[in-house]
Image: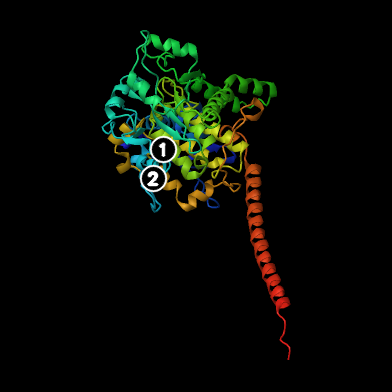
């Protein structure tokens, strides 16, 4: 298909652009295969807007006389308005934007056409390979191995080709366990706690069904993670009633009789359409311009967004507590093991592991626990809060995870190497990007699409020194301790940087942030001077002592 077929009117003049925090400006609108481009062409100050079609969630059309108004609502929650002279031009442009923003084929998306303007220093596709991560594990324990059983994705379509499993379990046993777990997602290593050797594993639900089916290989696999005389915890991210209902559909949970060394805990975390509805209600509340306090608080509460944050963080803290304080290993799963499971395992690692609070460590976490672990980004991030077509698979699962990270970062502002701009950047790129990192639903799909060969990795751009500086937290001081976030309602706040950034100017926040950076910079300069003066003083004192010790010889 040629993009030109979808672009009926490629250019329109005398278009007026309205967008948050800027005065209305007149200019020229151009449509390309992947971008909506607006240029003011003013003599005094040329303004440009480049908007990816894939970032457009929905559009609305209105007409007043011969002027057509197109309201564009974006996946990053921005709303812009275009006033276009001429009804035919307006209809043509609106039709083209709708067609170009809803392309079905992944290979027609911008990452396949994007060519970087920067020098590629590091190939991000190879930055966080499982073998490299395993080297770090191999330096502290020899009880685990890499299994290549899924190298052709035939055992589990949503798993990567290489997984980490107990050394005592062979591939034949893994294959048997895969037939007992939903979608073939057998238990694999998620995290190894160096402090006490306890581990966190993740999987999908067991297929016990109404007959109480069992799998001895499955029992042996998860028992292989236990120390002698120790119990383990199975954290099921569904309520007990939902888990029991799953048995009627062939799913279920681990029976106490077959897993006597494991204690099962149910912590209900919502999924799919409930989360999507929550996001829609939250964004609607944030866009409400009525300025009525009761109305705002009522709408915020009705969205249940902060309740979902609390549920996820509470479960992650529980998993971390079992590992660090109880000295027990943990298995986390829900139904598929691709959504709430990954929220819990990744947040527990941020609480427990200082490395995950560094920039590269966090990137490795996103790769390992989200991309390689099979979170279906293509389905979950297909639409955002403004979409008119409600489909079954959309859900802000990754955005909720990032929001939880922001809550922890806010409570421990000196423990993270990255700032909130880094988290916002990941949110934006998960929904619409020039990079191929978040395309596809799993490693199998990315392999078929040949993304490493045909697209650029987000990490190749982010990890360039000039970009990294924008995402570094000036307050960061490496903290090797476990950090325990508060999940009390008073401790959780609305993430203004995402949900209010297009409604309220961040000018004063930005200025205070710049001032903080300047103060820290000045403090470091003074510290250097103090250290220099101390050295000079020590040298002078040494010289004085030497002179006092020197006694002239008698004639």
Left or right placement of residue 458 versus residue 408 in this view: left
Q: Which residue appears at 48% of the width and 49% of the height?
A: 467
Q: Quadrant of the N terminus?
A: top left
Q: Pointer 1: residues within 10 angstroms few (<14), some, or many (20+)?
A: many
Left or right placement of residue 152 versus residue 139 in this view: left
- The one nearer the camera, 49 or 7, is 49
- Residue 87 image point, x, y percent: 45, 30
- Residue 384 image point, x, y percent: 47, 28
Scheme by which the image is coloured = rainbow
- Residue 534 image point, x, y percent: 68, 64
Kind of element beneath mark 1: helix
- The one nearer the camera, 286 or 219, is 219
The answer to whether residue 324 of the structure is visible from this angle is yes
Residue 367 tag number: 1
Kind of element beneath mark 2: loop
Q: Quadrant for residue 510, please give it.
A: top right
First along the sequence among labels 2 and 1: 2
Farthest residue to the front: give it: 554
Q: Which residue is mark 2?
A: 127
Q: Quadrant for residue 159, please give it.
A: top left
Q: Quadrant for residue 136, please give it.
A: top left
The answer to whether residue 502 of the structure is visible from this angle is no
Q: Are marks 2 and 1 in contact (CB under 8 Å)?
A: yes
For marks 2 and 1, give the CA distance. Answer: 9 Å
């Amino acid at each position: 298909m040629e993009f030109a077929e979808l672009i009926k009117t490629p250019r329109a003049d005398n278009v007026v652009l309205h967008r948050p925090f800027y005065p209305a400006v007149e200019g020229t609108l151009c449509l390309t295969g992947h971008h909506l481009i607006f240029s003011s062409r003013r003599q005094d100050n040329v303004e440009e807007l480049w908007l990816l079609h894939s970032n457009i969630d929905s559009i609305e059309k209105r007409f007043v006389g011969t002027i057509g108004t197109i309201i564009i609502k974006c996946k990053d929650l921005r709303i812009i308005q275009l006033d276009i002279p001429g009804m035919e031009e307006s209809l043509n442009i609106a039709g083209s934007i709708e067609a170009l923003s809803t392309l079905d084929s992944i290979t027609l998306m911008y990452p396949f056409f994007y060519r970087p303007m920067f020098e590629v220093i590091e190939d991000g596709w190879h930055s966080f390979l499982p073998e490299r991560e395993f080297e770090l594990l191999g330096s502290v324990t020899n009880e685990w191995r890499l299994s290549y059983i899924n190298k052709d994705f035939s055992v589990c379509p949503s798993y990567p080709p290489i997984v980490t499993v107990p050394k005592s379990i062979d591939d034949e046993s893994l294959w048997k366990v895969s037939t007992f777990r939903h979608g073939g997602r057998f238990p694999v290593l998620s995290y190894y706690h160096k402090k006490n050797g306890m581990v966190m594993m993740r999987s999908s639900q067991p297929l016990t069904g109404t007959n109480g089916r069992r799998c001895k290989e499955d029992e042996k696999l998860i028992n292989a993670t236990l120390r002698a005389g120790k119990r383990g915890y199975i954290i099921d991210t569904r309520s007990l009633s939902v888990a029991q209902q799953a048995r009627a559909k062939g799913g279920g949970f681990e029976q106490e009789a077959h897993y006597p060394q494991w204690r099962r805990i149910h912590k209900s975390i919502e999924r799919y359409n409930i989360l999507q509805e929550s996001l829609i209600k939250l964004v609607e509340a944030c866009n409400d311009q009525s300025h009525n306090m009761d109305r705002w608080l009522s709408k915020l509460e009705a969205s249940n967004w902060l309740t979902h944050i609390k549920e996820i963080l509470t479960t992650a803290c529980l998993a971390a507590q079992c590992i660090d304080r109880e000295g027990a290993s943990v298995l986390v799963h829900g139904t598929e093991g691709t959504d709430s499971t990954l929220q819990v395992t990744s947040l527990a690692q941020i609480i427990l592991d200082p490395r995950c609070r560094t920039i590269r460590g966090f990137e490795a976490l996103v790769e390992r626990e989200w991309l390689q672990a099979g979170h279906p980004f293509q389905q979950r991030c297909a639409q955002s809060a403004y979409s008119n077509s409600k489909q079954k698979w959309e859900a802000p699962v990754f955005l909720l995870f990032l929001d939880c990270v922001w809550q922890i970062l806010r409570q421990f502002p000196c423990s993270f190497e990255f700032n909130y701009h880094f988290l916002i950047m990941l949110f934006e790129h998960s929904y619409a990007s020039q990079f191929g990192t978040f395309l596809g639903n799993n490693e199998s799909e990315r392999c078929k699409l040949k993304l490493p060969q045909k697209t650029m990795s987000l990490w190749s751009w982010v990890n360039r020194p000039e970009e990294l500086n924008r995402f570094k937290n000036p307050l960061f001081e490496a903290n090797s301790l476990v950090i325990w976030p508060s999940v009390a309602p008073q401790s959780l706040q609305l993430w203004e940087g995402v949900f209010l950034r297009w409604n309220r100017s961040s000018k004063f926040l930005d200025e205070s942030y710049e001032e903080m950076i300047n103060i820290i910079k000045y403090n470091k300069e003074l510290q250097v001077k103090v250290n220099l003066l101390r050295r000079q003083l020590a040298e002078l004192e040494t010289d004085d002592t030497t002179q006092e010790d020197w006694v002239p010889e008698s004639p």
